[in-house]
C-alpha cells in the first residue's frame, strides 16, 4: 500500500485522511491510499533541500508537547507544530525539532512518529485530569493514589510538599529530591515521575 499522509483543509491540524486516490502517488492502482501532501517535504522546502542535511537515517531522541501550536518545524521550516519530535543523526551536529510528518519522513517510519505523538496527546489529556482524580487518604493522613502498578504518595512537610513512588513491579521506591510549594505541584511532578518510570519499564 502506498503510504503518504496529508492534511484536511487549510489551517486544520495534520491528520490522516483516507481517500481513493492520491495525485502524488506513483502507484495509482494501489488502493486505498492517503491524500498526499508529502511533496511539500520531499521537495526543497526548508532544510529538506539544504546540502549537508541528511534526508533519512534520523532517530527521535525526545518528543515534547508545547501546549499549543507555537513553533515551526525546523526541517521544512513551514509547518506550525505543537508536538516537537527532536531528531538526531550521526552525520548532523545538533538536534532538529520537527513536526510529525517531517519526523516520520526523516526516520522513514511515519507510524512510529504518529505513535509517539498520539501517546503524548494521551498523556497530556491524562495529566489534565490527574488532579481531579480521587486521591485517597492513607492511615498516616497523606494523599495517595494507586495506578499503573505504582503507589504514589504525597507528603506535606513544613509547608512544602514532596512525594514517593513505589513501583510494585520492580519493588523499587523512588522519593522526590525536590520539594514543591503546593500540593498540586507535587501531584503533577509525581505524574511526570510516574510516566518516566513507566517508560523505563519497557
Ligand atoms: Zn516539517
Image: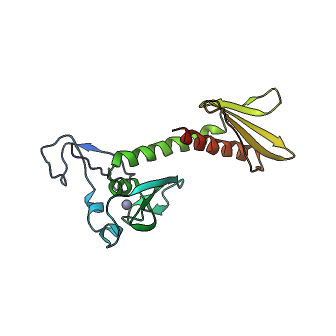
Left or right: residue 173 compared with residue 21: right
Q: Residue furthest top?
A: 139
Q: Is residue 92 above or below residue 161?
A: below
Quarter holding residue 196? top right
The quarter of the picture where residue 11 lies is: bottom left
Pick the front one: 162 or 34:
162
The residue sitting at the right extreme is: 158
Q: Which of the image's four quarters has the N terminus?
A: top left
Q: Residue drawn at (19%, 55%), measured in percent from left and top? A: 24
Residue drawn at 62 percent across, 33 percent down: 170
- Give the answer, above or below, for where 64 lies relative to 127: below
Side of 150 where 28 appears, left or right: left
Q: In the image, ligand 1 is in what quadrant?
A: bottom left
Which residue in the rendered view is the most extreme toward the left?
Answer: 29
Is residue 158 found left or right of 191 in the rendered image? Answer: right
Visible residue check, residue 49: yes
Amino acid at each position: 500500500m502506498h503510504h503518504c499522509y496529508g492534511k484536511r483543509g487549510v489551517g486544520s491540524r495534520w491528520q490522516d485522511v483516507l481517500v481513493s486516490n492520491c495525485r502524488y502517488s506513483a502507484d495509482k492502482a494501489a488502493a486505498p491510499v492517503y491524500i498526499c501532501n508529502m511533496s511539500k517535504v520531499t521537495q526543497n522546502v526548508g532544510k529538506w533541500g539544504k546540502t549537508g542535511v541528511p534526508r533519512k537515517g534520523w532517530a527521535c531522541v525526545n518528543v515534547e508537547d508545547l501546549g499549543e501550536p507555537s513553533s515551526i518545524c525546523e526541517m521544512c521550516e513551514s509547518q506550525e507544530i505543537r508536538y516537537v519530535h527532536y531528531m538526531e543523526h550521526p552525520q548532523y551536529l545538533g538536534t532538529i525539532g520537527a513536526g510529525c510528518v517531517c519526523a516520520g519522513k526523516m526516520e522513514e517510519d511515519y507510524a512510529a512518529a504518529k505513535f509517539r505523538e498520539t501517546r503524548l496527546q494521551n498523556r497530556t489529556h491524562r495529566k489534565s485530569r490527574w488532579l481531579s482524580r480521587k486521591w485517597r487518604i492513607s492511615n498516616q493522613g497523606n494523599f495517595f493514589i494507586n495506578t499503573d502498578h505504582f503507589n504514589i504518595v504525597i507528603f506535606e512537610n513544613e509547608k512544602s510538599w514532596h512525594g514517593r513512588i513505589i513501583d510494585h513491579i520492580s519493588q523499587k521506591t523512588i522519593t522526590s529530591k525536590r520539594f514543591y510549594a503546593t500540593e498540586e505541584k507535587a501531584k503533577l511532578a509525581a505524574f511526570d515521575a510516574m510516566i518516566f518510570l513507566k517508560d523505563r519499564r519497557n
